[in-house]
Amino acid sequence: MLYIIGLGLADERDVSVKGLEVIRKAERVYLEAYTAVLLVDQKQLESYYGRSVILADREMVESQSDDILANAHEKDVAFLVVGDPFSATTHTDLALRCRQHDPPIPTRTLPNASILTAVGATGLSLYTFGQTVSMVFFTDSWKPSSFYDRIAENASLGFHTLVLLDIKVKEPDLKAMARGKIIYEPPRFMTVAQCAGQMLEVEEERQQGVCGKESLAVGVARLGSEHQQIVAGTLEELAEADLGQPLHSLVLCGKKMHEMEWEYVREFAVNQDKFDRIWKANYAGKG
Amino acid sequence: MLYIIGLGLADERDVSVKGLEVIRKAERVYLEAYTAVLLVDQKQLESYYGRSVILADREMVESQSDDILANAHEKDVAFLVVGDPFSATTHTDLALRCRQHDPPIPTRTLPNASILTAVGATGLSLYTFGQTVSMVFFTDSWKPSSFYDRIAENASLGFHTLVLLDIKVKEPDLKAMARGKIIYEPPRFMTVAQCAGQMLEVEEERQQGVCGKESLAVGVARLGSEHQQIVAGTLEELAEADLGQPLHSLVLCGKKMHEMEWEYVREFAVNQDKFDRIWKANYAGKG
């Protein structure tokens, strides 16, 4: 059996009791470590679980899944995923491979908290979110802006948009590679400020009023942990906000934002007067 | 401190390790028991937690929250919620009351799995869902159809729609009430078949092609448990499907459904040939 186990969002004790029991008994334990990271390191996990954990990077999951699935039709293998297993398509892909394996490998998924629902901590209603959008790091020559069209779709119906921010772990250093060396760059995690900045940059170009300087948004950091932080404001304000250590995400507010959502979220505002003024002028009753 | 603790979806061992530690040490433990239910009963929870649990019905949470919050500014009180705390606005409401309490009561939320993400088990991408819709039991004289407009909005952009199904627990028996007696009706849980039937009924009336007999949908039951069940098909097929014990939910597929989603979800089809034929004719490449 392949158990795909959600670890939740913050630390080694966010796993479910059921998940922990499986981890402690499994033949091998893998940790998916490239679409999200916990706020604690591998050693802390291993010490709490009492098990050694094999780090599974993108290459292993996508190209060497046979190693992960070896003898899983007879033995229990645990594949750990930060957050909830189904919040990344990679895991649907792994489950598909189990189905197609000869002999087929039974799978069981243990769900857990996901950033997709933990953003409810902002006070924004989870029922009013549209499609989820990913934001990648812009470079000088590559500024993909398809996110803008998807946010515009959500905005056309007044939905909030959750923007998931880029994570770069184990990226090869291209200059070293050109010299025939494999060196990995240090991990990078996009911040709320960088995301807001990139949104404003694309708005500047497209000019459709989808994510401008006065658009209301909420930045979140380290959700689910004791040190979580939530900051609400205009995109212009968030582009200057410092939410500290990773992981960060951003929600762009939709015009369906209800008075009760506003009442809750305004407590997190950088500048409450400004937040209230813009809400009343451009959001209240406009959804 | 008021701890609002998600219990996850299936049984007493879906709570996080961290949540369980809080429950075992808290001064009082409440269980919210009207917006969702676990698949195990209160006794099983109490025996596993080693604590007695106070059932909090709608009236207690909405009108007598002072009892729940009593001395919570000094002592730890645990408020348990099936699924994830933020998947129901009631809990935002409770957190707001803690803020406004004199003296203010600090709160901490421990997130967990939610039906909003556990539906990823269908293979449908969680990133392509629009707003979430609730379906209530129709009566002879009351058939609220506002869900139809919201599904139509989602469908206009090709989004999937998660439909959450009505739960009636501790509903007073109106006939007995007229005789001055308070008797509660037995709990009722809407099934996938009932939901699909009501959707077809409203489609018949509105005729906008939003949720007709050939619309593809996925019914789910007891997600996250060992006995979970997933059935895919047309709404007409689902109106005849029996998914057994509660809780049920339904997802109406949007036209953005990607080939990889189709490949996964077709394994659950009542009639795979029909499912494939309709997908190819009306969904593939239409999103």
Image (cartoon, coloured by chain):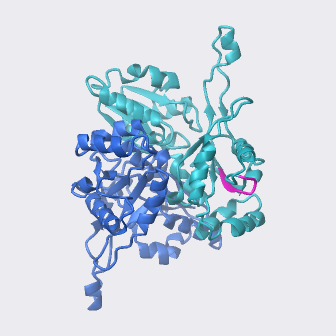
Chain colours: A blue, B cyan
Is B218 inside the magenta-drawn segment?
Answer: yes
Question: Quick one: B234 or B25, which is closer to the camera?
Answer: B234
Quarter of the image for residue B105 reads: top left
Residue B221: percent from the left, percent from the top? Answer: 64, 46
Q: Residue furthest bottom?
A: A179
Is A91 inside the magenta-drawn segment?
Answer: no
Quarter of the image for residue B182 reads: top right
Q: Is residue B161 left or right of residue A226?
A: right
Q: Is residue A65 above or below residue B197?
A: below
Question: Quick one: B205 or B83, which is closer to the camera?
Answer: B205
Q: Residue furthest top?
A: B180
In the rendered structure, which segment of residues is drawn in magenta? B212-219
Residue B93: percent from the left, percent from the top? Answer: 41, 32
Residue A9: percent from the left, percent from the top? Answer: 38, 52
Q: Is residue A162 above or below residue B38?
A: below
Quarter occupied by the N terminus of chain B:
top left
